[in-house]
Image (cartoon, rainbow, N blue to C red):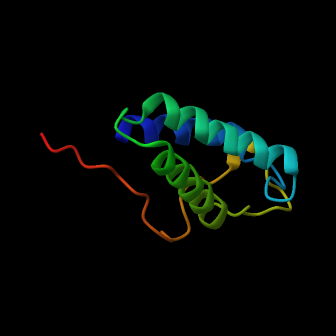
Amino acid sequence: MKRVARELLGRLKDLLVLNWRTKGTARAQLKLAIQDTLAAGLPRAYTPELYQQTCSAVFEHVYESYPERDAGGLCRSRLDLRPATPKRSIPILENDS
């Protein structure tokens, strides 16, 4: 799970551009990156329903926790990817072994 989170965070750095929240294309690219990263990295035990819940929860977390900072002079290289505050937990499937 940590590997998936690190990979997704790395992808976010390129996707969270100026006004990303108001641009439909930027939001769609973010959702697709979340879906692709989770599909490749989550355990196969995740059901389609749990996968969709997780994708939605991650997108909601990013949307709420990574607002644009210093929008007047914001550039990609200065984007602060530290979350403002944690909002809700993301469902994690525990392995019985």
Q: Which of 6 and 97 is in front in this view?
A: 97
- Where residue 82 sits: x, y (%)? 54, 57
Total count of labels: 0
Residue at (68%, 50%) from the top-left corner? 79
Q: Which of 77 and 17 is in front in this view?
A: 17
Decide if residue 77 is in sight here: no
**Left/right of residue 70 with respect to residue 72 in the rendered view:** left
Compare residues 94 and 61 and report the one nearer the observer. 94
With 93 as the anchor, is 18 left or right in this view? right
Left or right, 44 with respect to 21, comes to: left
Q: Position of 12 compared to 8: left or right?
A: right
In which quadrant is the C terminus drawn? top left
Q: Which residue is drawn at 87% across and 52% down?
A: 23
Residue 27 drawn at (x, y percent): 77, 49
| Rendered-image quadrant of the N terminus | top left
Q: In which quarter of the image is residue 41?
A: top left
Query: Residue at 56% of width from left, 68% of height from top?
Result: 84
Task: Inspect this view and state whether residue 44 appears.
Answer: yes
